[in-house]
Image: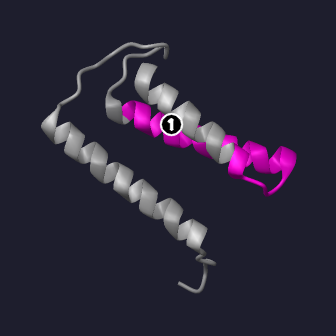
Amino acid sequence: MDWMAWTGSTALFFATIVLALGLMTILEIRYPTKLRKGFLPIETTRGDRFFIALLSSAFVHLSWLGFFGSMLVAASLMSLIWSWVLLRWG
């Protein structure tokens, strides 16, 4: 694993994603989702909204790096809020 500089933040990020995927799997087994139409222009399941939230959070972080530099705390907060809104009402 010498090709990547693993830091505590990187490990925490990937551990959080793995835990979230595990939680989504448990929720899907216990409470199967149905297609739902929220403010997104397509019908989505819980997993679809989670994927869109992860993808859009990556774009938020990359945009933040491009415009403001490496202080990513604000980008992370914006991503968390956006993900919560998307999962709740998307």
Q: Residue 78 at what x, y percent from top left?
A: 65, 37
Look at the image and say whether residue 50 sits in the magenta stretch.
yes
Q: Which residues are the magenta region?
A: 48-74
Q: How is this picture coloured? A: one colour
Q: Is 63 placed left or right of 68 in the picture? A: left
Q: Residue at x 43, y 29 (%)?
A: 87
Tell me, yes or no, if residue 70 can be seen here: yes
Placement of 68 over or under 50, stated as above or below: below
Whether residue 59 is visible, yes or no, is no
Does 29 sit left or right of 42 as displayed?
left
Residue ranking furthest to the left = 30
x and y, in percent, of residue 82 in the image: 57, 31
Locate residue 77, reporting x and y percent. Answer: 63, 42
The residue drawn where x is 60% and y is 75% is: 7
Residue 20 at x, y = what percent?
Answer: 37, 50
Main SS of residues in magenta:
helix
Q: In this view, does 83 lie above or below 85?
A: below
Residue type of the residue flagged with mark 1: Ala
Residue at position x 29%, y 53% from top? 22
Q: How crowded is mark 1: few (under 14 residues within 10 Å), some or many (20 or more)?
A: many
Indicate whether 6 appears above or below 75.
Answer: below
Residue 75: image quadrant is top right
Q: Does the magenta stretch include residue 69?
A: yes
17 sits to left or right of 78: left
Residue at position x 84%, y 54% from top? 69
Query: Which residue is denoted by mark 1 in the rendering?
Result: 53
Q: What element carries label 1?
A: helix
In the figure, residue 90 lies in which quadrant?
A: top left
